[in-house]
Image (tube, grey):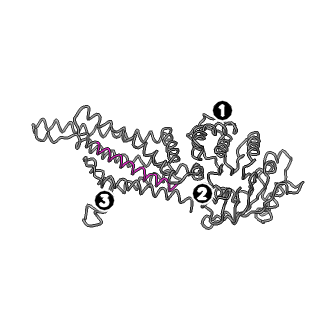
Amino acid sequence: MIEVKNLTKSYGNFVAVKGISFKAERGQILGFLGPNGAGKTTTMRIITGFMPATSGTVEIDGLDIFTNSLEARRRIGYLPETPPLYSDMRVESYLRFVAKLRGVKRSAVDGAVDHVVTVCGLTEMANRICGQLSKGYRQRVGVAQALIHDPPVLVLDEPTIGLDPRQIHEIRELIRGLSGERTIVLSTHILPEVSQICDKVVIINDGRVVLEEKITEIPAGTSLEEVFLHAIAREGHVEGASPEETLEEVGAGHSGQQTPPENQ
Amino acid sequence: MRNTFTIAGKELQGYFVQPVAYVVLTVFLLLGGWFFFAMLRQFDEMVQLIQMMGQADQLKEMNLNTRVIDPLLHDLSIVLVIVMPALTMRVFAEEKRTGTYELLLTAPVRTGEIVAGKFLAAASFTLIMVALAWIFPLILMIFGDPEVGVMFAGYLGLALLALSFVAVGLFTSSLTQNQIVAAISSFGMLILLYVISWPAEAGGGMVSSVLSYLSLPEHFSTMTRGVIDTTDIVFFLSVIVLALFLTQRSVESARWR
């Protein structure tokens, strides 16, 4: 379970996150959406304990990420915006390193590495050097390191970015298969992804939560794209901005939102 | 403790797959070899000169320890001032730039363990480097008769000096994500510790004794002369502990800043 309360983060005079609150229950996959620069990555970095909040709290399974940091961090698997790979290490030894670092027992390290290598489709890449991998494989290794200690909470910052359609499908299936007892927060720009795999959606804009809703509560016939644009437009901030187009949207014949901004 | 060794092991492996460490090692040993050669040539020439002049009592004063090893160690210490910043500049800076810092800081590991692990690895590599420089005393021992104890004290001094350089380097690397900035500031601090006693030579008093206490060569010279004094060892250890403490604070600051 992840509970975020009144989170604020300012960098000097710039306030990136302005009092965000939301909650992800155990077994839930929460889609975390928002335009670029809305504060998604900052929020995720605070949730995982990488940086402190200016005010507000984050609880991971009831443990405060700031005051009970070590215990809380033990429960989190985190895929940052850029996969945190050491470019001169081989995939397998990298995963072994992360396993030990995240506290996997010595006797269980081999098993854990084998497991994530299989699950993430890295069997043929296990002996390659991380720095020589393609973007898609780097991303997969990133997902693999987040899963390695079998954490109850997963925080994934754009897990499917840079993957080809087949890989996107695989990673999606993987995430869906992972949910069960876990709590997963994932940020993405691909809206159909959210409607396909998430149970709940939180949309933030300009550092504020503008929508928090279960996927099942979104009225039938309304696409998530409409919900998204409506939610962020309500703030009167991104007038005329077009959503990131994805293969699926193009395939589905969506060609709207291409009128240029009027303020020119 | 286990985390410290995990990090140290990974870091140490890193030194052996990266060109920087090999370049540092090679430059250190090659320059050392050149200085050694130069010192030996001078020694040889002096001995021949004295023999020609037939001054037997002066010949007795010709000593491999003071004429070859002592100046060689001083030269090596200057090479260390130049190459150690290159060895340590990437330790934290690179992780910050490539994003692996996020992995490290979100793992259930204390910052003290991270700093200790990184220091342990850099220190091990440095000690290997200093140990390889024993080749010069070994050559002297095969062809001459130097005092082993004095050389040992000198090399202990060199090792402690190098470890303080490592600690200072880790500190500057933890301050920035730019490796060049890390290297130059560490270089600056090391030079400062080298010349800090210069104003002290002019006048006496409290200030000058403090400045000369802070000077690295002051403590190092005692050891190259063969004297192992607790004052000097305590001095080097305090530099190491202080620099590592500051590094830990600097890494930890990411958690509250």
Inspect the image, locate mark 2, and give the three-letter code of the amino acid beneath it: Ser
Q: For the residues marked 1 and 3, what is the alpha-carbon distance in whole angstroms?
A: 59 Å
Question: Residue at position x 74%, y 53% from top?
Answer: A26
Q: Mark 2 points at which residue?
A: A69
In the rendered structure, the residue with mark 1 lies on which chain? A
Percent from the top left, x then y, of residue A205? 74, 61
The Cα–Cα distance between marks 2 and 3, rounded to whole angstroms, is 41 Å
Please state the horizontal and vertical placement of residue A21, each as a whole percent of the image. 72, 63
In which quarter of the view is residue A51 placed? bottom right
Q: What residue type is labelled 1?
A: Glu
- SS for dot 1: helix
Q: Are marks 1 and 2 on the same chain?
A: yes
The numbered disc on residue A124 is: 1
Q: Name the residue under label 3.
A: B213
Q: Mark 2 lies on which chain?
A: A
* Between marks 1 and 2 in the image, the one whose residue lies nearer the viewer: 2
